[in-house]
Image: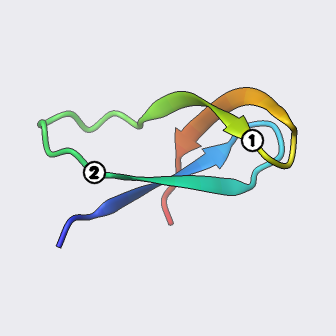
Amino acid sequence: MTKKIVLCCEECGSRNYSVPARNNGKEERLTLKKHCKQCNAHTVHKQTNR
């Protein structure tokens, strides 16, 4: 079973996306620019701790 990473919007805090986790040895948090339905704009989404 593949682990999932949950992404949270930096502007409003809503958890909009989940992506499969990669095991590439890095322990950095994933940061992506995605569309937020709540903000209705493209915002930065960061990995959460669940």
Of label 2 and label 1, which has the lower sequence position? Answer: 2
Q: Residue 15 location, x and y as percent? A: 66, 57
Nearest to viewer (mark 2 / mark 1)? 1
Which residue in the protein does label 1 denote? 36
Task: State the image coordinates of residue 30 (x, y, percent, origin top left).
Answer: 42, 35
Please report the residue visible at 49 percent of the width from the left and 30 percent of the height from the top: 31
View extreme (right): residue: 39
User: Could you say which is closer to the camera, residue 10 or residue 17?
Assistant: 17
Q: Which mark is residue 2?
A: none
Give the residue at x 76% y 50%: 13
Indicate whether 39 appears above or below 43: below
Type of residue at label 2?
Ala
Q: Position of residue 7 (x, y in %)?
A: 54, 49
Check disc 2 and report the residue beneath it. 21
Q: Quadrant of the N terminus?
A: bottom left
Disc 2 crowd, CA 10 A, few/some/many (<14, 14-19, 20+) = few
Q: Is label 2 in a helix, a strand or a loop? A: loop
Q: Is residue 44 above or below residue 12?
A: above
Residue 37 horizontal/vertical position (percent) = 80, 47
The residue under the point 27% across, 64% down is 3
* Depicted 30 relative to depicted 38: above or below: above
Dot 1: what SS?
strand
